[in-house]
Image: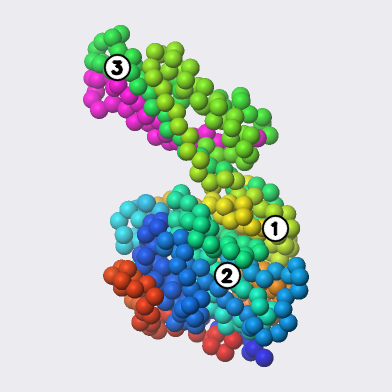
């Protein structure tokens, strides 16, 4: 019989995860470049979580698929019973420069930073792996818990790469969460659309330029660009129903190199967000029409291109109702809502939910007194380590529910609920992060572990 873990044990465990998270934060890597992060995760899973190396597979170039197997002794699963449930954590950073000089773990890599909290998602999934592996004997015989350590969520289709490499083969359901600046420890979730479809567009307006003192002998693309920019603002207000949420944002304008020269071309680019294919089609058609006819009116050539990015994240009703029910039971109905949803941000978790049922939810990170900026994609953002217990608990509760088991008792799970305040500002940065050379030469090599990684297991060696 498994022993009961004390609150102090879990405190030490999550404090250790916070250290690991902060080390990942200070060593960020962009999408499909997560070589050292991948090696770090592998080392932790093998040396600390004690997951056999053969159960850890490369996937999606710099990602990992990890299977934790229940005992094979015992009756086979009944027909219709779930056999494999997957959980996703993304690992990539953003091409941004961090401005958090007050943090000992500020990014060491110029132009690259974890400004969306994927360092926290990675650390959470690492700790979750250890917690499940320690209690795998309590899973139903022949069942599998699969962990998806995904690269390149930030616009580079990492989920697609993982799926192409077979990460969903045999999976019945898939779950994930994202940190978001809602109230600390609250959970935001709903069925149906929860995050937007995203597309990026580019517009090139070209014609003969010339001297700024003689505009009458030129075809001025700047004037046409101004007209197009203003006309684009009418798409959401005049071409769509007030009930259809959408965003059209022109984010870049480039043209000209001299103060006295009308350029021969101007380039505009930006993004659209919406929640249905019909709305997306309307936006696309209207943009193309505006570019074509405005350029014709100014006797200019116009080129318009739309690139599809991520589809809408659509949460199935059945699995999302389960997530809502679990969340209400453990933190109270007043702290679980759909307020603020759906978001106009995009997420490649959509590709998983297009292939398998599951659910995607948000855990709030925004406290009132911690002094941190919790707004994602800002250069002063920092993940809130206080939600690490909640992330682990939600995933463990889903295992208990979906497999009809109890790998952790209600009492133990209750010790993981409330965000706890620790003096995590002063934690030292681990020194066991593998070198890039080691990671490239042998990502399967067992890297030397230290007391830092062992701290993340403190108090759990009897589970």
Q: Nearer the viewer, residue 54 or 228?
A: 54
Identify whether 274 is placed above or below 421. Answer: above
Whole-Å distance between the Cαs marked 1 and 3?
Answer: 56 Å
Are discs 2 and 3 less than 8 Å apart at CB? Answer: no
Q: Where does residue 75 sit, x and y in percent of width and height? A: 73, 82
Identify the residue shown where x is 49% and y is 81%: 52
Q: Where does residue 305 sit, x and y in percent of width and height? A: 45, 32
Q: Which residue is mark 3?
A: 208
- Write down the region rendered in magenta: 244-271
Q: Which residue is mark 2?
A: 146
Find out whether residue 261 is within the magenta segment.
Answer: yes
Whole-Å distance between the Cαs marked 1 and 2?
Answer: 19 Å
Residue reaching furthest to the top: 216
Please identify, in this view, whether the residue under mark 2 or under mark 3 is nearer the observer. Answer: 2
Q: Which residue is mark 1?
A: 320
Occupied quadrant, residue 311: top right
Q: Quadrant of the C terminus?
A: bottom right
Identify the residue shown where x is 55% and y is 66%: 387
């Amino acid at each position: 019989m498994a022993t009961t873990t004390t609150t102090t044990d879990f405190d030490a465990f999550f404090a250790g995860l916070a250290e690991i998270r902060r080390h990942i934060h200070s060593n960020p890597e962009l999408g499909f470049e997560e070589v050292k992060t991948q090696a770090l995760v592998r080392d932790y899973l093998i040396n600390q979580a004690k997951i056999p190396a053969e159960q850890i597979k490369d996937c999606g170039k710099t990602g990992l698929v990890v299977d934790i197997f229940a005992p094979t002794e015992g009756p086979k699963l009944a027909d219709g019973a779930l056999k494999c449930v997957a959980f996703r954590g993304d690992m990539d950073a953003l091409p941004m420069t961090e401005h958090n000089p007050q943090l000992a773990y500020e990014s060491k890599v110029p132009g690259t930073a974890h400004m969306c909290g994927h360092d926290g998602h990675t650390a959470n999934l690492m700790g979750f792996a250890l917690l499940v592996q320690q209690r795998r004997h309590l899973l139903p015989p022949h069942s599998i818990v699969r962990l998806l350590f995904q690269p390149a969520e930030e616009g580079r289709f990492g989920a697609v790469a993982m799926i192409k490499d077979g990460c969903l083969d045999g999976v019945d359901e898939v779950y994930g969460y994202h940190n978001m600046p809602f109230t600390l420890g609250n959970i935001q979730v709903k069925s149906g659309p929860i995050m937007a479809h995203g597309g990026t567009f580019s517009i090139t307006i070209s014609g003969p330029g010339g001297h700024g003192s003689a505009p009458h002998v030129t075809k001025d693309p700047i004037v046409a660009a101004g007209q197009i920019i203003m006309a684009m603002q009418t798409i959401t207000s005049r071409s769509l129903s007030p009930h259809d949420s959408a965003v059209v944002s022109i984010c870049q304008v480039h043209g000209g190199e001299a103060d006295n020269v009308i350029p021969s071309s101007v380039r505009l680019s930006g993004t659209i967000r919406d929640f249905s294919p019909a709305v997306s089609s309307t936006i696309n058609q209207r943009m193309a029409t505006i570019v074509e006819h405005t350029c014709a009116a100014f006797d200019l050539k116009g080129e318009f291109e739309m690139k599809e990015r991520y589809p809408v994240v659509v949460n199935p009703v059945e699995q999302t109702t389960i997530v809502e029910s679990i969340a209400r039971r453990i933190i109270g109905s007043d702290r679980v809502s759909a307020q603020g949803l759906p978001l106009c941000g995009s997420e490649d978790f959509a590709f998983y939910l297009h292939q398998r049922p599951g659910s995607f939810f948000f855990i709030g990170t925004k406290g009132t007194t911690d002094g941190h900026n919790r707004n994602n994609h800002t250069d002063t953002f920092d993940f809130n380590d206080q939600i690490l217990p909640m992330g682990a608990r939600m995933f463990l509760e889903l295992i208990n529910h979906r497999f009809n088991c109890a790998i952790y008792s209600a009492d133990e799970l209750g010790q993981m609920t409330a965000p706890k305040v620790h003096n995590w500002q002063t934690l030292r940065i681990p020194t066991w992060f593998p070198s890039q050379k080691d990671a490239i030469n042998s990502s399967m090599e067992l890297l030397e572990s230290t007391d830092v990684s062992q701290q993340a297991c403190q108090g759990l060696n009897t589970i």
